Image: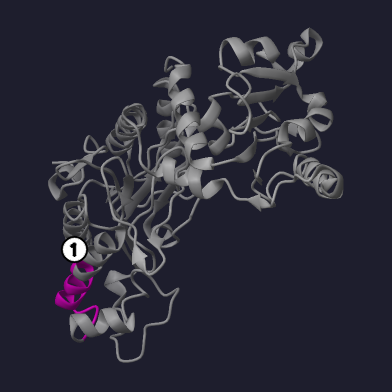
Amino acid sequence: MTQFDPSIHASRRQRFLDQLGAAAAVIPAAALATHHADCEWPFRQDSDFFYLTGFDEPDAVALLLPHRPEGERFVLFVHPKDPAAEVWTGFRWGTEGAVERYGADIAHPLDQLSALLPGYLVGAEAIAFRVGRHPVVEPLVLSAWGRQLDSYARAGVAALGLVAPTPILHRLRLVKEGHELQRLREACRISAEAHELARSITEPGMNEAEVQAAIEAHFRAAGARGPAYGSIVAGGDNACVLHYTANTAQLQDGDLLLIDAGCSVDDYYNGDITRTFPVNGRFSAEQRELYGVVLASQEAAVEAVRPGGNAEQVHDTALRVLVEGLVDLGLLLGDVDGLIEQGAYRHLYMHRTGHWLGLDVHDVGAYRLGEQPATLQPGMVLTVEPGLYVSDRLAVPEGQPEIDDRWKGIGIRIEDDVAVTESGHEVLTAAAQKSLAAMERH
């Protein structure tokens, strides 16, 4: 478990405040979610709230108030200490802990939010709040703003409008600090170990669920919270379903097994790895050919990750290698540039090549800034995950060859997590092997 360091979150708050101008920010925590009649899912904090505060309890609300004097700019509303409630739901830090451990200038019991929020917002030129996401807090924010507008004729001051805090926050979150990169390395280390374990135990006749159980048991045993997302353990044709999570089929001799799984560590940073290997330890000729194409595509795309580049270049690099390989194998016909322009490959490769990674698996941050793709810079982390999926699910485009049965049911994806560095990139998931030789048992 990582050691909590309040200075990390204090530094983030200051950078956020510096960019807020004179807007007062209201940042709510996540609420508990229920299933069945009254059972609650394990709590998962809102990533924006956690980034700024490190506070890991539900329903809290953070106020960041650049218009207030020093010593009043970070206010937390939290559930108070309550021994009777803690018997049922566990320890609470309360208002004292919010100040002493988490660095709040002022902390109040949560039930005082509606009474105190309007006063804290007075004097701000705008209110920074993400509408449409927080049904309990949003009416309080709108009411407070409405009261300011109602009294404008007498007081002569009111917030000019609601602004979104997320563009500022998500620009900050997109470029990872050194501490964040260390936590991502830890998540990737544990995730890579689980993939190596899975490949070592897989045999024909096992159930996908058995492999999933081994992977997720390793996550927990190694100190992670658990899976970062629903693990995909897809044998044979199941791998051609991109978000397959049933994980209930028996693994067949001669099939490939695609595993897309990663862990989330205690402070929510994530790993996200995909590996594909033969269930019986030996590729068929067709599997080997397609695996070689995907691997070449993935390695070329990883090499395209560098400062000054962009995620579209990474995707375009992967796509060109895939299409060239499919033409060489006779699965596509035509000129490579024309096939790419027409999208004639999309029945075999239908997704983009990656996404940002951080506190969220599909992490925040813009991919484009207006007409231009966002430029990669040191500290950004993205996945690189081309694949090929050969099945009857999508129609073959006009003018392209019908797919021979020997190719069908082969789904392959290879995914690594890659950090942009000053000189190029760092593959955070390199401990999970992916070469053709490593994927086979000799």
**Of residues 434 and 239, the one drawn nearer to the viewer in this rendering:** 434
Front residue of 335/16: it is 16
Answer left or right for 66 relative to 411.
Answer: right
How far across and how far down the image is residue 388, in percent? 31, 64
Q: Residue at x 62, y 33 (%)?
A: 67
List the residue tagged with mark 1. Answer: 293
Q: Around disc 1, counting alpha carbons within 10 Å, would you say few (fewer than 14), some (14 to 19), or many (20 or more)?
A: many
Screen quadrant of the C terminus: top left
Is residue 247 among what the camera can see?
no
Is the residue 435 above or below the residue 5 in the image?
below
- Apparent side of residue 103 relative to residue 424 in the rendered image (left or right): right
Magenta stretch secondary structure, dominant: helix
Q: Quadrant of residue 32?
A: top right
Q: Is residue 92 magenta?
A: no
The answer to whether residue 339 is above or below residue 276 is: below
What SS does tag 1 mark? helix
Q: In this rendering, is residue 385 above or below 13?
A: below
Instruction: Give the quarter of the figure containing the N terminus.
Output: top left
Q: Is residue 351 left or right of residue 69?
A: left
The residue under the point 65% across, 13% down is: 93
Locate residue 270: give its quadrant: top left
- Taking the image as shown, residue 218 lies to the left or right of residue 46, namely left
Specify the amino acid type for callout 1.
Val
Q: Looking at the image, which is closer to me, 188 or 5?
A: 5
Which color mode does the image show?
one colour
The x and y percentages for residue 109 are 77, 20
Residue stretch rendered in magenta on the structure: 321-333
